[in-house]
Structures are given as structure tokens and as C-alpha cells.
Image (spheres, helix red, strand yellow):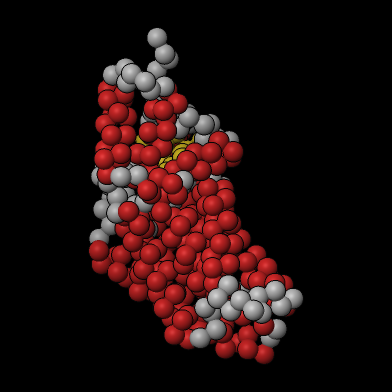
Amino acid sequence: MAERVNLDVPRWDQTQYWGRVKYFLTTTNPLNIFKSNLELEKCKEIVNNYKKGDSIPDGWTLDDIYKAKDVVDSAYHPETGDKMIIFGRMSAQVPMNMLITGCMVTFYKTTPAVIFWQWFNQSFNALVNYTNRSGTSPMPLDQVAKSYVLATSGALVTALGLNKLVKRLPTVAGRFVPFAAVAAANFINIPLMRIKELENGIEVYDENKNLLGESKSAARQGISAVVLSRVLMSAPGMVITPVLMEAIERRGLLRNMKWAPAPLQIAFCGVFLTFATPMCCALYPQVSPISIDKLEPELQKSAEKFDSKIGYYNKGL
């Protein structure tokens, strides 16, 4: 009889960086976006049946069960189990960001283009954040709207302001303006979307799953980690691509192909994002540790009661 495994636990060691990278490589796999509703439902049914104790279906192996679980993780909400909007799924992140990032670094010179693509990017981010919102702590629509408006405004102010400043600098400087705008928007958007966590704290447990309480310190640490990983995720495509394009155009390689810059930059961004997305999502463990001495005094007292050595919290994505 084949060994049974716990499908609620990733197959790779999540305390190790490369284990987390492998996990996110499977959940962000762009090929999963092409799965039909029938295929998604079949995978979900097989995974749920296996969790209930059913044996592996005839013709299937344990590896097939894991692959079905990867498909489920890429399309269904981890807490509610609901099928997510297709453009908000983890499997849509690379193709959507490839298109958006490629267009932002291509059409950065004119004000209408900057406004459109920065707006489009923040609209997509709002959709992703709302689709992946916590199932236990629903995200009010007014909070989503406030974050969306302020993040979009921040990105536009940064992009349009920097575009004016870099006019006297070498042309390559202007190519980095979209990255600065996206980074600024992340510093606005993510904390606003998770403002309740900053105000009320997030749950912290010890190594034995004992609840120590809700910590604002853990919330700040977790949100800072998410902001950093999001900025770094966008960096390769938005920093290396402009350098490559500047070198290519300086050599006149595209002189007779006026149509080429946009698809070429989108392709560059796609290559970078395919690897940057899982590698940056994996920078910090999903369940992250925090030193007891960094927690609030009341949580430190709880830790003493349980003789806890370290706290853990879910940092989110």
C-alpha cells in the first residue's frame, strides 16, 4: 500500500529557501491558467477525496496527486476553497505582469501612456489583492477602494514627477522611472490593504501552536517583508530590461524594426518574472518566526506561561 501523505503540508521543506522556491514554482506555473473548469473540478475532487481517506484512483500515482494539488493551489482560495477570478489567480501572475511590466517600460515617454499603464497596473494589483484576501478577515470594499485610489495616485505622481526631472539626464535614466513608480505604489498599497493588521495586530503562535495573542510588531514585520519581496520581484524586469534595450538600441539593432521594441521588452520581462516571482515570494517563510523579545509585553508574558522559545505568524503574500 502506498504511503499516505498530508496534502495540507507542502511536499518541500518550507524552512529552506529552495524548498519554498519549488513550492511557488508550481503554484505560479502559468500553464495552470489554461486548465478548463472541468479539469479544475476534477483535480479538486480527487484532492478532497484523498484528504478524506480515499485511495489513489486507478492509473494515478502519488506524484499525480501532488500535481493535482498544485493545480488546486493555483486556482482556489486556500481558506474558503472558492474558485478565484482567473486574473487574480497565482497562475496568472507571470503572464499578466509580463504584459503590464513590458508595456510600462516600453511606453514611458508620453503622459497619456504613463497614466494608462500605471492605472492599469494598480487596477490589476487591486484585483489580485481582493481575490486573495483573507477568508477569515474579509476586506471591506471601501478599504480596497481607498488603497486603490491612493496607490494609483502615488504611482502617477512619482512617474510624472520623475519624468520631468530626468529630461536633462541621459536617456537611460527615463527608462527607470516606471520601476520607481511601481516601488512607490507598493509602499502605499500593501500597508493600506492590510491596515487592520497594523491597527489590531496578527495572531502569533508558539512552536507548540499555543496562541500567544495578537501582535502589531509581527504585523509590521510581515508587511515589511511582503513590500520588500514585491519590489524585488518587479526589479529584474524593470531594471535589467531597460539596460538591455538601451544597449540594443544604441547599436542600432532595431533600426529597421520599429515594431520590435514592445514585444521584445515584454518577452524580456516574461523571462525575468518567470523566475523572479517564485524566488521573491520565497524570500521569507509563509509562516515566519519572530523573537519573543520583539513582541509586546503581554505576549511575552503569555510566552513565559507556555515556556515558549519563539513565536510564529502568517506573513501573507
Judged from this view, the residue extending furthest toward the right is 251
Count how many numbered circles sit on residues in the image. Answer: 0
Residue 166: quadrant of the picture: bottom right
Q: Percent from the top left, x then y, of residue 11?
A: 48, 29
Q: Nearer the viewer, residue 232 or 114?
A: 114
Q: Nearer the viewer, residue 234 or 17?
A: 234
Q: Percent from the top left, x then y, of residue 86?
A: 32, 53
Q: Residue at x 30, y 39 (%)?
A: 39
Q: Is residue 151 above or below residue 216?
A: below
Q: Residue at x 41, y 54 (%)?
A: 92
Q: Nearer the viewer, residue 208 or 260?
A: 260
Q: Residue at x 47, y 55 (%)?
A: 94
Q: Residue at x 29, y 65 (%)?
A: 143
Is residue 43 left or right of 277 when viewed as pictured?
Answer: left
Residue 85: quadrant of the picture: bottom left
Q: Quadrant where the N terminus lies?
A: top left
Res. 268 in view: yes
Is residue 210 left or right of 286 when viewed as pictured?
Answer: left
Q: Is residue 234 above or below residue 297?
A: below
Q: Percent from the top left, x then y, of residue 34?
A: 37, 48
Is residue 232 left or right of 192 when viewed as pictured?
Answer: right
Judged from this view, the residue extending furthest toward the top is 1
Res. 187 in view: no
Q: Percent from the top left, x then y, of residue 112?
A: 44, 85
